[in-house]
């Protein structure tokens, strides 16, 4: 991919129509809308699709460049909306407090607003297989640092050739994507998941 053709902006500087174009897919991302770690209870049982869309629209603050916060970044390729990455303070994701991956074997303050997280990467159909997730992961570093993050964290999967990953599991990203972006592995809580971080105070 020619990086000169790629532009990545905070979601509040994009239009809601552009975000919708990225999420307009029949797979996991289109149904979840990056609400998996935000809704109360089990995502499919305790929230409706329309509720998740409304939550996403409110969180992105699309079309409001002066918004106090937004929930991610939107990537454009030749001015076409092509990708999304969710990046926010960890405290924006209530369900992360109860999951094994972020906390198994670690003793950290779950309410530390200085820790930001990357929870989801999406590439629109028609733009996949061109390396856009690598650029999105890299963009989260400067974005989080500039907004006062002390640490940026991700929970990617270890992919293995020939081994199928189902149910949208890879929405968290692959380990090699974050390695190339400059994240360092700090923990390996499950056979297929790692915790990777960028420490801005190091």
Image (cartoon, rainbow, N blue to C red):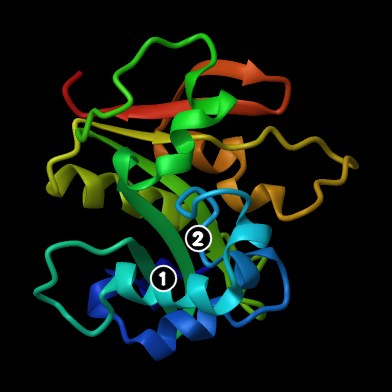
Along the line of sight, which residue is nearer the eye, 113 or 164? 113
**Who's the residue at 38% across and 10% down the image?**
107
Along the line of sight, which residue is nearer the eye, 199 or 40? 40
Position of residue 114 measured from the top left corner of the image (x, y, whole percent): 20, 33
- Label 1's element? helix
Left or right of 122, for residue 115: left
**Who's the residue at 49% across and 26% down the image?**
102
Among numbered discs 2 and 1, the one appearing first in the sequence? 2
Tell me whether circle 2 and circle 1 mark residues in contact (CB < 8 Å).
yes
- In the picture as drawn, the residue positioned furthest to the bottom comes out as 17
Residue 148 sits in quarter:
top left
Left or right of 200, for residue 108: right
**Who's the residue at 23% across and 52% down the image?**
143
Point out which mark residue 79 bears: none
Task: Classify the position of the C terminus by image quarter.
Answer: top left
Along the line of sight, which residue is nearer the eye, 93 or 129? 93
Disc 1 crowd rating (10 Å Cα; few below 14, some 14-19, many 20+) is many
Disc 2 crowd rating (10 Å Cα; few below 14, some 14-19, many 20+) is many
Q: Which residue is mark 2?
A: 34
Residue 80 sits in quarter:
bottom left
- In the picture as drawn, the residue positioned furthest to the left comes out as 66
Q: Which residue is mark 1?
A: 56
Q: Is residue 197 visible?
A: yes
Give the answer, above or below, for where 48 lies relative to 150: below
């Amino acid at each position: 991919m020619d990086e000169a053709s790629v532009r990545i902006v905070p979601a509040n500087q994009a239009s809601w129509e552009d975000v919708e174009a990225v999420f307009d897919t029949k797979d996991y991302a289109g149904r979840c809308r990056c609400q998996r770690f935000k809704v109360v209870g089990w995502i499919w049982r305790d929230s409706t699709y329309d509720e998740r869309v409304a939550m996403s629209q409110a969180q992105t603050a699309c079309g409001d460049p002066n918004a106090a916060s937004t929930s991610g970044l939107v990537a454009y390729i030749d001015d076409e909306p092509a990708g999304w990455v969710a990046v926010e303070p960890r405290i924006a994701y209530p369900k992360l407090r109860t999951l094994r991956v972020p906390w198994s074997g670690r003793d950290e303050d779950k309410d530390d607003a200085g820790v930001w997280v990357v929870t989801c990467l999406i590439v629109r159909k028609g733009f996949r297989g061109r390396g856009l997730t690598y650029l999105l992961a890299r963009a989260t570093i400067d974005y989080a640092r500039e907004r006062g993050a002390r640490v940026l964290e991700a929970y990617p999967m270890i992919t293995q050739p020939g081994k199928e990953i189902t149910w949208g599991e890879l929405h968290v990203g692959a380990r090699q994507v974050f390695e190339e972006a400059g994240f360092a592995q700090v923990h390996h809580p499950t056979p297929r998941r790692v915790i990777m971080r960028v420490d801005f105070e190091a």
